[in-house]
Image (tube, helix red, strand yellow):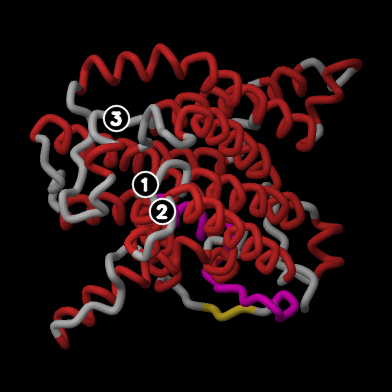
């Protein structure tokens, strides 16, 4: 909105600042952060009064969770989405179609997560919405967004370490991209099992993709680095900044011991947002590196389920992976901080692919 006003004003004087993505990114981050911090206390109080018993706690999980986490309200992801949406509408160029694609997935996945959280809280059950229904809706939303994105960016999967080289997949690319978006939404969801565990790695991944989006959207930088240029994708750096601000504001209340959980409302939305940004910037493979922590958590569940069905034996003490280390005796804060360190290292490894070509 501010970008549009600046353009109408002719970019004269102070309005000239709003032309710059870097300035608007800082504004978006601070706006989303302020909204989350200001709304947080009252919002959490409202959730607590409405939900009563809060999020159901798994009885087969670490025993101490029943004592330390019972009664904590969920659906805190709404706080992230409010901060992100307001900041996005205020600071981004709303004439950019990529903005709407990212918002469609983020808010759409958030709505699906909200339905799932609502069902769990009202029934005090872990089941929630049927997995098939949820995945079907996610894939539908992701498919619509990826169809639009591919019509602008093409149907080629670009590979890291190779200069502007990719595999033309045709219409299969849309299915692949939708799978990435849907899969990453659920990967973040699986990771969200400890206080602050999913939030900070999302912040780290979003920061990495803010850099990637800015470079991919700038023809000079993309030409220098040998990466595929996507006109208009630089605007996603502002979206990433708003995402970071909203998550940091939420983390203030989600830090151990958490006052609120983001729930599926937040985790599905955040994962879907990261997946969409990766598709827009043609860095789907790099997403698997930058978001490698989420990939590892997901693989731990797949390996655990597959091993138990085939052999009757479990590979991990409990899946996802963070619960395995809890069962081994690691304190929750130890698991969280060490996983944050891994997320930082993986993000740096992903950014290194920009130069190693």
- Spatial CA span between label 1 and label 3: 19 Å
For residue 144, above or below residue 224? above
- Disc 1 element: helix
Image coordinates of residue 335 in percent, x first then y, are: 47, 56
Q: Residue at x 17, y 32 (%)?
A: 121
Q: Residue at x 34, y 15 (%)?
A: 45
Give the residue at the far top of this rendering.
42
Q: Counting other residues with Cα less than 10 Å from the Cα at mark 1, is it few (<14), some (14-19), or many (20 or more)?
A: many
Would residue 124 appear left or right of 183 to someone viewing this image? left
Instruction: Determine which quarter of the picture holds residue 10.
Output: top right
For residue 3, above or below residue 315? above
Q: Are marks 1 and 3 in contact (CB under 8 Å)?
A: no
Residue denoted by label 3? 72
Choose between 277 and 267: the one closer to the eye: 267
Pick whichever of labels 1 and 3 is earlier in the sequence.
Answer: 3
Question: What is the span of residues highlighted in magenta in the rendered image?
Answer: 145-164
Pick whichever of labels 2 and 1 is earlier in the sequence.
Answer: 2
Residue denoted by label 1? 268
- Disc 2 element: helix
Which quarter of the image is occupied by the N terminus?
top right
Please tell me the numbered disc located at residue 312. Answer: none
Residue denoted by label 2? 188
- Spatial CA span between label 2 and label 1: 7 Å
- Spatial CA span between label 3 and label 2: 20 Å
Q: Are marks 2 and 1 in contact (CB under 8 Å)?
A: yes
């Amino acid at each position: 909105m501010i970008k549009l006003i600046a353009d109408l004003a002719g970019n004269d004087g102070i309005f000239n600042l709003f032309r710059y993505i870097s300035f608007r990114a800082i504004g978006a981050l601070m706006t989303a952060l302020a909204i989350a911090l200001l709304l947080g206390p009252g919002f959490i109080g409202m959730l607590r009064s409405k939900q009563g018993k809060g999020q159901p706690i798994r009885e087969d999980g670490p025993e101490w969770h029943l004592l330390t986490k019972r009664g904590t309200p969920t659906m805190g992801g709404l706080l992230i989405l409010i901060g992100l949406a307001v900041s996005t509408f205020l600071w981004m160029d709303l004439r950019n179609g990529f903005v709407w694609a990212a918002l469609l997935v983020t808010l759409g996945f958030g709505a699906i997560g909200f339905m799932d959280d609502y069902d769990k809280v009202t029934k005090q059950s872990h089941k929630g919405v049927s997995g098939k229904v949820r995945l079907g809706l996610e894939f539908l939303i992701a498919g619509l967004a990826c169809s639009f994105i591919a019509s602008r960016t093409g149907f080629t999967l670009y590979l890291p370490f190779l200069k502007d080289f990719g595999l033309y997949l045709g219409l299969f690319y849309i299915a692949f991209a939708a799978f990435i978006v849907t899969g990453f939404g659920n990967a973040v969801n699986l990771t969200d099992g400890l206080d602050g565990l999913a939030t900070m790695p999302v912040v780290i991944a979003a920061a990495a993709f803010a850099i990637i989006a800015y470079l991919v959207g700038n023809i000079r930088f993309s030409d220098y680095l040998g990466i595929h240029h996507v006109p208009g994708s630089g605007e996603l750096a502002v979206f990433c900044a708003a995402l970071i601000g909203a998550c940091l504001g939420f983390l203030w209340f989600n830090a151990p011991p958490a006052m609120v959980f983001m729930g599926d409302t937040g985790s599905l939305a955040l994962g879907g947002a990261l997946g969409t940004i990766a598709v827009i910037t043609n860095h789907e493979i790099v997403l698997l590196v930058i978001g490698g922590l989420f990939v590892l958590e997901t693989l731990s569940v797949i390996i655990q389920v597959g091993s138990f069905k085939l052999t009757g034996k479990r590979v991990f003490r409990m899946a996802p992976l963070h619960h395995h280390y809890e069962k081994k005796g690691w304190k929750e804060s130890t698991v969280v901080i060490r996983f944050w360190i891994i997320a930082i290292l993986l993000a740096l490894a992903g950014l290194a692919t920009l130069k190693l070509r």
